[in-house]
Image (spheres, helix red, strand yellow):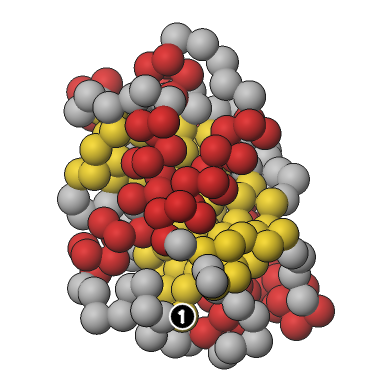
Amino acid sequence: MSRAWRLIILEPVDCYTRCAIDEALLKSVGECRSPNTLRFLSIKPPSVSIGYFQRIEEVVNVEECRRLGISIARRPSGGGAIYQDYRGEITYAIVVKAQDELIKGLDIEETYKKLLQWLIRSLRKLGLNAQYKPPNDITINGRKVSGNAQSRKYGAILQHGTILLRTYKNIMAKVLKTDREKLKRVTGIEEELRREIDRKKFIELLIGSFEETYSVRLVKGSFTDYELKLIEKLRKKYSDPKWIYKR
């Protein structure tokens, strides 16, 4: 019999709430208060998300973000700076106990590779040439369609990432300190398919691929009271300028 995981699908939230949700899930699952969890959501309004270890002035055009009214959030995970827009992406998070049979004994790169197979399967079902690019990306015909990051804490592993539907390279070029050649190597699913996709049906495809890939059963659920209290507390941390500009 397949093991049950919790599935949480949310309406769009702001960037600080997203960070709070993911750390709350990491803590709750790690403390064995909640089951392993897969969550989906989008970020609204648009924002810039930077990795835990990054120096904000080196990777973000802060003044341009202020001019455009784009918030900046520092994630609990590593990785690079990204522009996030609910119109052009879906984000996911996998939260799994560190000693779970799914990833027990794997090093960081092996864990990424294992926990990205469901996304690769989903994209291939759409007829796309999706490939794993070490350590933490998925590409289509050599162009990045999904960037991912991890946090290991509380006895659990959080892996979260973006699944790009379409790109907003003109805005990316303004708010991120990155070269245009790098932006050319980014793509979205709709750009590759040359058609729009139905978000609800795409999430259903993702859910099915997750269950098939890891032999688990996803059961739709919600946050516990413990998690809701944590989210409220942690959102204050993630929205505090002292946290955002700590480096």
Name the residue at the bottom extreme. 31
- Asked where in the image residue 169 lies, by quadrant, the reply is top left
Quadrant of the image containing the N terminus: bottom right
Is residue 85 placed above or below 150 in the rendered structure? above
Name the residue at the top extreme. 194
Whole-percent x, y for residue 153 in the image? 43, 82
- Res 92 seen here: yes
Q: Nearer the viewer, residue 118 or 55?
A: 118
Whole-percent x, y for residue 228 in the image? 77, 73
Which residue sits at x=47%, y=73%? 96
Is residue 243 placed above or below 9 in the rendered structure? below
Amino acid type shown at disc 1: Lys
Q: Nearer the viewer, residue 119 or 92?
A: 119
Q: Secondary structure at mark 1?
A: strand
* Residue picked out by circle 1: 97
- Left or right of 30? Residue 80 is left
- Asked where in the image residue 200 lies, by quadrant, the reply is top right
Which residue sits at x=71%, y=44%? 12
- Left or right of 4? Residue 11 is right
Is residue 129 placed above or below 103 in the rendered structure? above
Which residue sits at x=40%, y=49%? 118
